Image (cartoon, helix red, strand yellow):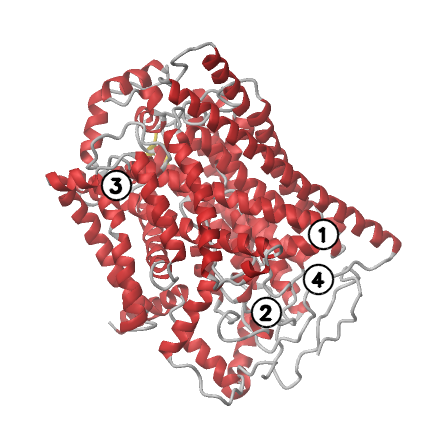
Amino acid sequence: MNAMLAGFRGLAHYLNGVLGADAYEKYLEHHAASGHTDPPMTEREFWRDRNDRQDSNPQGRCC
Amino acid sequence: MSTMPDGKPRSAGLDDGPTPDPALPAPSVDEAVREAEERKWTPAKIALWVAISLLGAVAWFMVAIVRGETVNAIWFVFAAVCTYLIGYRFYSKFIERHLLRPNDRRATPAEYKADGKDYVRTDRNVLFGHHFAAIAGAGPLVGPIIAAQMGYLPGTIWIIIGVVLAGAVQDYLVMFFSMRRGGRSLGQMAREELGVIGGTAALVATLLIMVIIVAILALVVVNALAESPWGVFSVGMTIPIALFMGVYLRHLRPGKILEVSLIGFVLLLAAIIGGGAVAGTEWGAALFTLDKVTLAWALIVYGFIAAILPVWLLLAPRDYLSTFMKIGVIAMLALAVIVVRPEITVPAFSEFASRDNGPVFPGALFPFLFVTIACGALSGFHALISSGTTPKLIEKERQSRYIGYGGMLMESFVAIMALVAAISIDRGLYFAMNAPAALTGGTVETAAAWVNSLGLSGVNLSPGLLSETAANVGEESIISRTGGAPTLAVGLAHIMQQFIGGTAMMAFWYHFAIMFEALFILTAVDAGTRVARFMLQDSIGNLVPKFKEHSWRPGAWLCTAVMVGAWGAVLLMGVTDPLGGINTLFPLFGIANQLLAAIALAVCLAIVAKRGSFRYLWIAALPLAFAAVVTITASYQKIFSATPAVGYFANNAAFSKALAEGKTSFGTAKTVAAMEAVVRNTMIQGWLSVIFVVLSIIVIVTALAATVTSFRNAAKGIPNADHEDPARASRVFAPAGLIPTAAERELMAQWDKLPAGQRFETARRH
């Protein structure tokens, strides 16, 4: 049962990575590691900022 | 930090890269240790590769040589997988070792430009999935099916051999060179390496090619959804579902992407099931039965609105759904082909393999088979994805082989499975579905009679089978459903029903397949329009600076309208074409895509020459030469062929002459208006072919010139200007491939022992 749970967790973690859902965690990690003194963006601010950047820098999707 | 003397030609000896931080464990496996590991052949390793080679050889023998009544689908899988494994282990390793020479002591852009947003070190397996989701779409599900007109073998060989020697090489080279340049785009690299003329030609060609590709993908969707109330309803429902997901992520639970994707996926399944019920009602059928022209206009209006709406509202959520569906599609194809293992009765070479007048697409096997199957074997569009996003996320240089080369092998595998699924259907059915209505006549009786008149061996199609199949998949008719998508959907439904649900479930599987193809294509249409609009804005911005401001609404809207207008015009041309849009336009799609590949490979060739790797120039030159010969020959025939079915201008002349003689019907065009449409369309298509090929030749010639210059400089001992970012010392380590080697595991253990504070410190503070 535990192994199954761990498997599911691993899958969810992987899917989150592929979908880019872990972007905020990575941002916080980077923020902490790079020695910024100002507080990081909140989760809501981060996703807004991310979408705004996608708006002005679109990425192609293949055929 | 960089100890690399500037201007030193990189070809001179093994460059060791920057000096690593002595306080940290090594950022790369010791060269001698890696070398020893790679060169050491243990008996187990030898046995494994002998087994893979033998299995591959047997599989190829079964697929290509044995001429039984049928061939089992599983042999296609073995032939493909064994060839991929050998290509990956030996050829891509050869390219890595001799041509690219990645250096893990160098930091990647994700490390030295780390900003927590665009440049983020990403786990290699996650990035593999991410990159695959970005490159794979409807292309590999469509081209191989259309090409099946020639029989299964030419397509199978081209997909498997083509990817190993051309497609995956292109993706790998472009990704590596872009990574060394901080994630620069193909256009920027072309400009740097080829100068103003080559760079501008590459930019204009890319823009035009994108228009064509978007238009023809849209045509595939229109053909799949026309006169299909079920399809229109369920695909239409993806719009409100995506809007809901967008609002949910923006206002309710930001960042909960997996959660909202699961909700969206369930809603999507509900829309597919609900579509059957809606299409069964009188109002549903009346409301959602749309003809091709109406659908095309709907798609054009939709394309414009979608491209000016903010990304969070429609594009991003649908992208999540689309990624989810990709996983579903692979699972379904694997189930269908590997678990069910259907028998294939299609001949290896069909009667049309040696002719140039096939009903699905015209032209001889060489070169047209090689342009019809672009995605899955060699797709230029990938060069746009492989430069840009992915290189900004790679953690270590050596991972580019796994992600770039390996990712493309995966797409090729999807193409093979799609081909097998589609050719598992009755051959008569295949031709009835994929020939234009002008030939099949549109009714079950005329279609069956026409297919039987082709004189194909073993084909005896009854009208009953056509109407029965249509009823099983919940459609009014399946005749002349060109574009490949419906054929794959029927093939998948046919296989899946043997596995789950029987004929009662066939309609669900069919519409599930249509749904994912439509979803992929709509995402590509959306994203393509946006990217093209930005390219146009930047180009106009060179003359009118105001256009460079991307937030300036009038400029954005005007450029979006221009781009949508351009692909919309081609789309309308396709749906109204009396010859059947796919038949005339699909070759243009393939030519466009592979000309882009030729452009990308030409840029790679120039870079390889600048790096001084003349001995291994052929690695880029070989696929470039092939792509150039295929596309230029195909373009030449499309422009100059005297056969009206093949040559655009020959067709134009034939119809112009008929009009001048006062005829009111000619060939497949039954009215004067239709004849005038043919004259107009062939003229536009012909000139598009001319422009594409001229631009591509300019790019190739400038690349060859750059290569010769590099060669001369090297002979004289003058260093070539290098556009790579300066080398910086890496302060992280990660394994190169899927499974870490013993040496990599040892090094990882050293890094794991490091205190957390020290481990993720970035080299650059700000």
Question: In the rendered image, which residue does mark 4 sit on?
Answer: B723
Q: Nearer the viewer, residue B200 or B562?
A: B562
**Labels 4 and 3 positioned on one and the same chain:** yes
From this view, report whether residue B466 is shown above or below residue B17: above
Name the chain under label 1. Answer: B
Circle nearer the viewer, 1 or 2: 1
Expressed as whole percent of the image width and height from the top left, the position of residue A18 reads 41, 64
Which callout, 3 or 2, points at the residue further toward the start of the chain?
2
Numbered-mark total: 4
Going by the numbered disc 1, the residue's amino acid type is: Gly
Query: Would you say residue B350 is visible in this rendering?
Result: no
Question: In the rendered image, which residue does mark 3 sit on?
Answer: B510
Name the chain under label 4. Answer: B
From this view, report whether residue B347 is shown above or below residue B10: above
Sort mark 1 into few (<14), some (14-19) or many (20+) by Cα contacts within 10 Å.
some
Going by the numbered disc 2, the residue's amino acid type is: Pro
Question: In the rendered image, which residue does mark 1 sit on?
Answer: B195
User: In screen coordinates, is B743 left or right of B553?
Assistant: right
Question: In the rendered image, which residue does mark 2 sit on?
Answer: B109
Q: Nearer the viewer, residue B429 or B260?
A: B260
Circle nearer the viewer, 3 or 1: 1
